[in-house]
Image: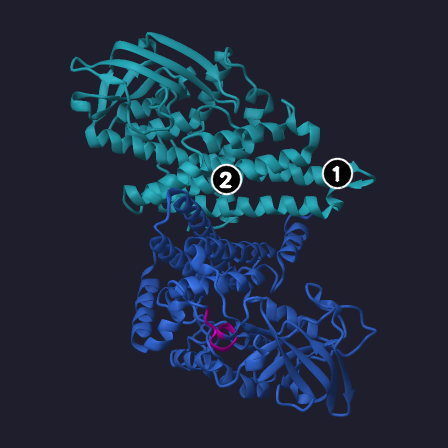
Amino acid sequence: MRTDSETEAAFRRDVREFLAARLPAALKARVAKGAYLSGAEMRGWIALLAERGWSAPSWPKDYGGAELPPRLRAILDEESALADAPATEGLGLSTIGPAIIAFGTEAQKARFLPPIVSGREVWCQGFSEPGAGSDLSALRTRARRDGGVWRVDGSKIWTSDAHNSDWILCLARSDTEAGRHGGITALLIDMKTPGVTVRPIRWMNGVHGFNEVFFDEVEVPDWNRLGDEGAGWAVAMHALGPERIFVSRVAENKRLLKRLRAAMDWAGADRDMLTRAARLEVRLLALEERFLGFLHDIEAGRAVSDEVSMLKLTGSRLIQSFEALIAECYGPAALPFDPARAAEEGLGLEVGPPAAAMSALRLLHHRGYTIAAGSSEVQLEVLSRRVLGL
Amino acid sequence: MNGMTAVAEAASPIYEAALRWVEGEFGAARRARCLADEAKAAAIWAELAALGLLGVSAPEAAGGVEGGPEEIAAVARAFGRGGMSEAWIPVAVAAASILSECGEAALLADLVAGKTRPAPAWTEPGRGWARTPGAARLDAAGRLSGAKTVVWGGALADRLIVSARGDGGAPALVLVSASAAAEVRRYRMWDGGDAAEFAFVAAPAERVLATGAAAAHALDRALDLAALAMASEAVGAMERAIELTREHLKTRVQFGRPLSANQALRHRLTECWCEKELARALVQRAAREFETGGAAERSRIVAAAKAMAGEAGRLVANETVQMHGAIGVTEEAEIARLHRRLLAIDLTLGAAPAQLTRFRAA
């Protein structure tokens, strides 16, 4: 769609060759089908990518990354999508690792970063609570200092992948008198610590994606504190910050455009369907150009403005529009459902093409995209206050 | 990379020059000039010529500034903000492109200098926005017959570039004096532009500019460039409409508090801003890629930008008038003028759904 520079074209070739050589056929088939991947499948793929530093493409080379500039990172995402390679969306790689790089001690970096890059340790993010969703600062999980350790009590909810995770970045209130954003401390907690329990929550498509995580007098060494005591809000904002731009889901939208084309071919789409699909493709072209504009700002050393919230808002809605149209193409074949198969294998119930069965699962799963990671309403509020000055 | 960001684009000298003029000398009063006041219209056109804005993409030899689609888009965006209603797009963008493609250097130089004002005349009654000629015919003796409808810029044009079928039905582009028409009906359109109906009965052509594939190609490029310019003009108009509405929400007090205290209104205006940003990005992309591929790629990306800008423009036009309340639907209000222009831009050359069809067919 967009013309590459020479460097970009060479990198794109390199990625294509790597994917052709290293992406296991069975994994590719699972991704092409749209299956939900198991923890083991994800870890295996991260390990393969790590050979080139591409599991953490933007990270410094010292920490196992490839120091890819944003534009090359976008090409890696795009080519992975087109080749049916898994999207590496692990929170360790996307948000928690970068927060450890920014706030961690040298000892913490040495302990935690290599296993994130290699896929040996997977992380989840303990932010949301029953009473603190969009309003994260209302969190109530407590952390009390007790000599050289912290004692953590409380619970987290909507914790993605906690059941597959080895570690959790937990935000806890260490000072109840220090205002809403003050008095929050970030702790790195081993999920095997006594007192940590995980209870599954199924998405409305039957897949086990969310969890509740309970902390009952969990003892955490002060060594595991990330950043200063009471500085957890800054850690959280950083974790949500640098990768915000990639929440535009440009690469994932391109994956869906490909799926939509396949669905329209299968269904023999009529003129009306083709026009509606064209409308989404046009919006994707616009989103991509705006996304590249932000990348350009980053590469030119400019701060990313608050305008970036429009990417999350637009990209997440676009995903939902694609999914709705794909399901529509498959007609009745998109309706059957087997909760056990969804829960255990991450697959839909096939009465037609496999893609039809998966489209139903994704349609329901992706309904959450405009709610997670800052709901659409939060994005609109940020834009309206900080960009439009209303 | 020119025009990569809002800042870079705003800083382009030609954008600044166009904006200064349209917000300054052009001014609110002259926007409302009446069609009959030809002296005033001529003065405005002379100013555009003096500023070099009639030759944005023309070569230096023709007195132009040798810009490309990105510069055309930049000027159009400024005109969109300022509510330029003169026929700059049909004449200085579309007709100039045709003359340039057809190697008409002398005539192009006259256009750039403001000495001639040709308007492309391709629309025929009952044929919508079809780009191929219908009943209009060029006979073997070089005489033109047929009707052209809603010729944008036609009311003040001294010449027309008429599409017609020549020998064996192949398309031709014919240069003809406006005074050669048997009948002319001049009028305004509700967005402030001027247009006219022309009927030709064996009118002698000044000359034939192109025939066959060359004619089709020249018209196609010209109309793609016009569509790009309109999409960019829509971006400028959206920017201005959003600014006006922002001020209105902050200052208008109802129920004892400013309208902006209502989250519903704030979020609706923010939705408008996001759509405008998408349109701005895609227009920028279309301008950058206009010349980089073949005709099919060009048509495809321009249709995408026109569809996006048309749809976003309609949303912004409707929402910003709604939020202005009663003042928004009055003749004199700036927001109403922007509303009219945004709707007309979407309709002209084919509204968003038609552009989407072009996009997927290209």
Q: Residues within 10 Å of mark 2 (few under 14, many from 20)?
A: many
Which chain wears blue?
Answer: A
In the image, which residues are magenta?
A341-348
> In the depicted view, which residue is nearer to us: B57 or B323?
B323
Q: Which residue position is annotated with label 1?
A: B251
- Asked if residue B39 lies left or right of residue A152, the reply is left
Q: Residue drawn 65% across and 55% down?
A: A377
Q: Which residue position is annotated with label 2?
A: B311
Q: State which chain disc 2 sits on.
A: B
Cα distance, mark 2 to mark 1?
Answer: 28 Å
Which chain wears cyan?
Answer: B
> In the depicted view, which residue is nearer to us: B80 or A300?
B80
Q: State which chain disc 1 sits on.
A: B
Query: In the picture shown, does residue A258 fall above or below A44?
Result: above
Where residue A70 appears, as percent x and y from the top left, is: 45, 65
Tell me if residue A54 can be seen: yes
Q: Main secondary structure of the magenta part?
A: helix
> In the depicted view, which residue is nearer to us: A31 or A21?
A31
Disc 2 vs disc 1: Cβ atoms closer than 8 Å?
A: no
Element type at marker 2?
helix
What's under tag 1, amino acid-wise? Thr
- Asked if residue A11 lies left or right of residue B310, the reply is left
Query: In the picture shown, does residue A115 fall above or below A14?
Result: below
Q: Would you say residue A198 sits in the magenta stretch?
A: no
Q: Earlier in the sequence, mark 2 or mark 1?
A: 1
Where residue B353 appears, as percent x and y from the top left, is: 43, 38
Q: Residue drawn 75% across and 38% down?
A: B251
Query: In the picture shown, does residue A168 fall above or below B125?
Result: below
